[in-house]
Image: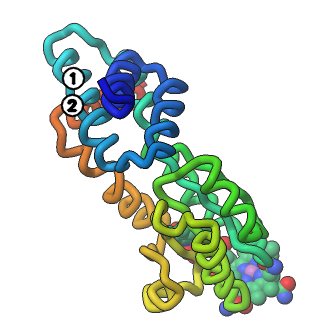
Amino acid sequence: MSREEEIRAGLFDHTLNGHAPEVKTLTEEALALGMDPMDILFKALIPSLEEVGRRFEKGDFFVPEMLIAARAMQCALGYVIGTVKGDIHDIGKNLCVIMLEGAGFEVFDLGVNTPPEKFVAAVEEHKPDVVGFSAFLTTTMPMFKANIEALTKAGLRDKVHIAVGGAPVTLEYAKHVGADSYAPDASMATRMAKELVGDRSQSSSGAQALEQAVMKIDETLRKG
Ligand code: B12
């Protein structure tokens, strides 16, 4: 068995058993080896969640096991976000963080006044699926370009999806600086991030079963 096959098998088993730290370590190793993130998702993580769904339907798994497995997989989906250098506005960014975490992302919030080097270091360390830059001033929006240039210089530009946002930002401006996406609000930012990494899992039967279970728990808790 090649190391890549061992990693896929390990990701499958550890997700099934809810071992989040092992899932994270193996995902990091897979990315370091140059494995395609889509390969990791479709050949290991999603099949594992589908198996969780099947076991739930058969009655072999109960809601806690499903939630633990889902959580283990979510560890693999990361989002680095921060307000750019020179800017201390963070209300909009914080709303994005809350919604992204609610959607299951592991969010690394770098706070405000974040210099390009800090974004580069966080992308290197956490290997997120998405990095998001917030700017609220016309004078700090040019930092998007500076950040993208810093990521390019560090050889990381093609390894991460770049999203930008903030009150004065427009889709045209996002395209102009070379970002991959723009969202006008936290809800759209979350939907777009999920489309990138999560929605494919939603189409699987296991993930749908999981979502239904989570909704049932939510409904029950609301009723008290
Ligand atoms: C609150 C506020 C402040 C607070 C900030 C508190 C805080 N902790 O954030 C304080 C008082 C500190 C402040 C300071 C300043 N402010 Co101010 N501030 C505002 C104000 C009133 C609201 C901003 C806000 O929070 N909006 C609400 C959030 C929810 O909306 P949002 O930011 O758009 O975020 C959403 C989306 O943009 C998106 N989003 C956000 N981030 C991201 C990231 C990604 C990746 C994605 C995909 C999406 C996304 O999702 C969010 C949630 O739905 C605006 C005016 C206004 N009405 O907009 C001025 C405003 C932004 N400030 C302004 C200015 C000029 C300043 C100061 C320079 C004032 C001064 N002379 O000192 C300083 C700047 C200090 C600095 N270096 O940053 C100007 C900017 C003008 C411009 N075009 O550049 C504004 C527009 C006011 C004005 N009309 O003049 N400010």
* Residue 107, position as x, y percentages in the image: 57, 48
> Is any part of residue 214 visible from this angle?
no
- The earlier-in-sequence mark between 1 and 2 is 1
Kind of residue indicated by mark 1: Glu
Which residue is denoted by mark 2 in the rendering?
Answer: 206
Q: Quadrant of ligand 1?
A: bottom right
Q: Quadrant of the C terminus?
A: top left
* Residue 127, position as x, y percentages in the image: 55, 50
- Front-most of residues 83 and 12: 12
Does label 2 point to a residue whose CB lies under 8 Å from ligand 1? no
* Residue 194, position as x, y percentages in the image: 36, 54
Query: Residue 136, located in which quarter of the rendered image?
Result: bottom right
Query: Residue 41, located in which quarter of the rendered image?
Result: top left
Q: Is residue 116 left or right of residue 181?
A: right
Which residue is depicted at the point 53% across and 43% down?
106
Q: Is residue 160 left or right of residue 218?
A: right
Which residue is depicted at the point 22% across and 8% down?
60
- Examine the rendered structure and indicate whether residue 40 appears above or below residue 5: below
Alpha-carbon neighbours of circle 2 within 10 Å: few (<14), some, or many (≥20)? many
Residues at marks 1 and 2, CA–CA distance in whole angstroms:
7 Å
Q: Is residue 179 left or right of residue 118?
A: left
- Front-most of residues 208 and 144: 144
Which residue is denoted by mark 1 in the rendering?
Answer: 51
Which residue is depicted at the point 18% across and 39% down?
204
Q: Secondary structure at mark 2?
A: helix
